[in-house]
Amino acid sequence: MGISKKNLTKRLSSSAVIITIAYFVIFHVPVYVFLVAVEAFVLVALHEFFTIAEKKDIAVNKKLGLVFGAMLPLCVYFPYEPILVAAMLIVLFLVNFKQPQRSSSIVNVAVTFFGILYVAWFFSFLAKIRCVPYGPQWVCFLIFVIKMGDAGAYFIGSKFGKTQLTKYISPNKTVEGAIGGLMVAILSAMISKMYLPHIELLQLGLLGILLGVVAQIGDLAESLIKRDVGVKDSGAIPGLGGILDVLDSLLFTAPLLFYYLTVVLRIQ
């Protein structure tokens, strides 16, 4: 399984642009501007998710879902997530009371609600991480470890991959690539000691293991969704797919990192 030079060029070019923008937004703008960036990613990725669902002929409440999705990152300032999540579910049911197609109501509510939680709620944890002590460094840590792991899995899998990891979900992913990606994630986490000198190397290594494994689960989870619908990419970013494709490995890892920082390391 070789690497296409054309695809690699597109992938590296798109990644370079995203990394440059991300670096500026993480370290050189106020928190509220960072929150606006999170909102933008949430809305685009959530729109992509709902569009994918519609390709499966699922009638989702797209507009309502986007409104609620946009509200979740704001909980960094107004910590009322349980109330908001409960309100979301109630409103989704209320809206479906008026729908004539009763047979699809449960799917409508379930998929819309799932999309809001899966994309908007999970990614909103990035804003919470930004607000803890050394927040910019921790956001950088998360993205650095995850994306280096992604790159490691891609290059090592392309060069040495022989054993399929998940034949029916993502045939191009290999066991060798997964192991290589995990090793690169761990190494990247430990290298991060340079800008997180107050954190023990053991803790960084443990985070590298956890994030490296969970990131690959997140990647496969999105692949499962796309495989079910029959689409290759969620969008049209050259070499990378869509915004949801870019964020997939961050969706499960952002909450994991936040709770590790606040519960295990007790960083508040």
Image (tube, rainbow, N blue to C red):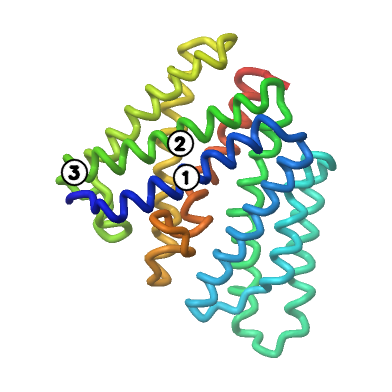
Q: Is residue 33 above or below residue 64?
A: above
Report if the CB atoms under discs 2 and 1 are less than 8 Å apart.
yes
Residue at the spot 54% in from the left edge and 46% down from the top edge: 251
Image coordinates for residue 263, horizontal then vertical, percent: 65, 24
* Secondary structure type for disc 2: helix
User: Which residue corresponds to mark 3?
Assistant: 161
Q: Is residue 82 above or below residue 149?
A: below
Q: Nearer the viewer, residue 235 or 250?
A: 235
User: Which residue corresponds to mark 1?
Assistant: 249
Residue at the spot 45% in from the left edge and 56% down from the top edge: 222
- How many residues crowd around disc 3 within 10 Å: few (fewer than 14), some, or many (20 or more)? many
Q: Quadrant of the C terminus?
A: top right
- How many residues crowd around disc 1 within 10 Å: few (fewer than 14), some, or many (20 or more)? many
Residue furthest right as drawn: 78
Give the CA separation, mark 3 to mark 2: 20 Å
Q: Is residue 144 above or below residue 158?
A: above
* Secondary structure type for disc 1: helix
